[in-house]
Image: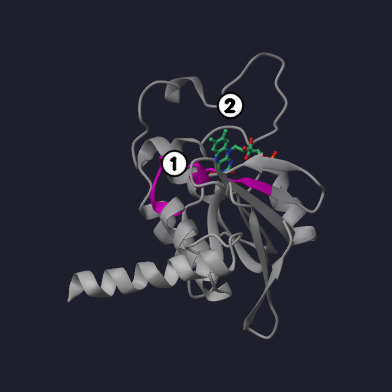
Amino acid sequence: MFAAILLNDEWGRLTAAIENPNAALMFETLDDVRREVAGRLARAAKDRKSPMHVPTVVTSDVDARVMVLREFDQNAWTLRFHTDTRAPKVAQIEGDPRMAVLFYDKSAKVQIRVRGKGRVLRDAEVTDTAWANSDNFARRCYLGEGPGALSDVPTTGLPPEFQGPEPTDEQLVPARPNFAVLLVELEECDWLYLAHTGHMRAQFSRGDGDWQGRWVSP
Ligand SMILES: Cc1cc2nc3c(=O)[nH]c(=O)nc-3n(C[C@H](O)[C@H](O)[C@H](O)COP(=O)(O)O)c2cc1C
């Protein structure tokens, strides 16, 4: 019975391939693609080894930098990052929240480009939770000079006493105000899949809460 279902399924895919040889077998509908994007981003946040764990994050001043993706909320289609409140990107996002984020997974042959609005949360519950879930080595990054602070000598920005050892919880109290969560609420998404039979591309945009999709030529 199980084998029969599998065979039937394979036959369906084979037929689809014969009818449309350019179609990649896994992605026959826009819903398939949207599920694939959501699943891939959610896994990327959890998997440190995923190439999509460290996407390129672009702000409206046409500056770009690598950041660690901490979470993808599949219901709200929102990305979560962590940042230092003193980093230049924070002032930029608060002045003009338009953002883009670029992901590429070479072995999966998938590029995902998203655009949305950024929000920096300093004192929200999500920020407290993220801080509580960080270890003291991660929190130490927020203890020294802010990103971009000038120095006359090569510097880690950290006070000398914290360059080796892990600070204690008490020593980290002054670091907490420098820590914030950056949420990027997605409004547009562009998915490109590279296949030897021909690449495939789909775009999605969010109007009144609902996502609308379309196929486009790569
Ligand atoms: C692998 C990697 C991961 C990084 N992760 C973060 C991060 O999660 N948050 C962050 O603010 N900066 C992160 N950075 C540093 C940023 O790329 C950037 O240098 C810093 O945030 C200052 O950015 P700004 O000057 O644009 O504000 C990371 C850099 C690398 C190379």
Tell me the amino acid under the disc marked 2.
Gly
Left or right side of 137 for 141: right
Residue 75: percent from left, percent from top: 49, 75
Residue 190 seen anywhere in this rendered image of the structure: no
Picture residue at 49% right of the left edge, 49% below the top: 176
Circles 1 and 2: CB distance less than 8 Å?
no
Left or right side of 48 for 113: right
Residue 83 seen anywhere in this rendered image of the structure: yes
Residue closer to the observer: 37 or 72: 37
The image shows a total of numbered marks equal to: 2
Residue closer to the observer: 125 or 56: 56
Tell me the amino acid under the disc marked 1.
Arg
Against 127, residue 103 (above or below) is above
The residue pinned by badge 1 equals 139
The residue pinned by badge 2 equals 157
Mark 1 secondary-structure assignment? helix
Q: Which residue lies furthest to the top in this view?
A: 153
Mark linked to residue 94: none
Quadrant, the N terminus: bottom left
Cα–Cα span, label 1 and label 2: 14 Å
Residue 96 included in the magenta stretch of the image: no
Q: Give the range drawn in magenta.
A: 45-57
Residue closer to the observer: 173 or 209: 209
Residue 73: percent from left, percent from top: 48, 67
Residue 154 falls in image quadrant: top right
Mark 2 secondary-structure assignment? loop
Against 109, residue 96 (above or below) is below
Picture residue at 45% right of the left edge, 22% below the top: 163
Quadrant, the C terminus: bottom right
Left or right side of 18 for 150: right
Residue 34: percent from left, percent from top: 54, 69
Q: Which of marks 1 and 2 is nearer the N terminus?
A: 1
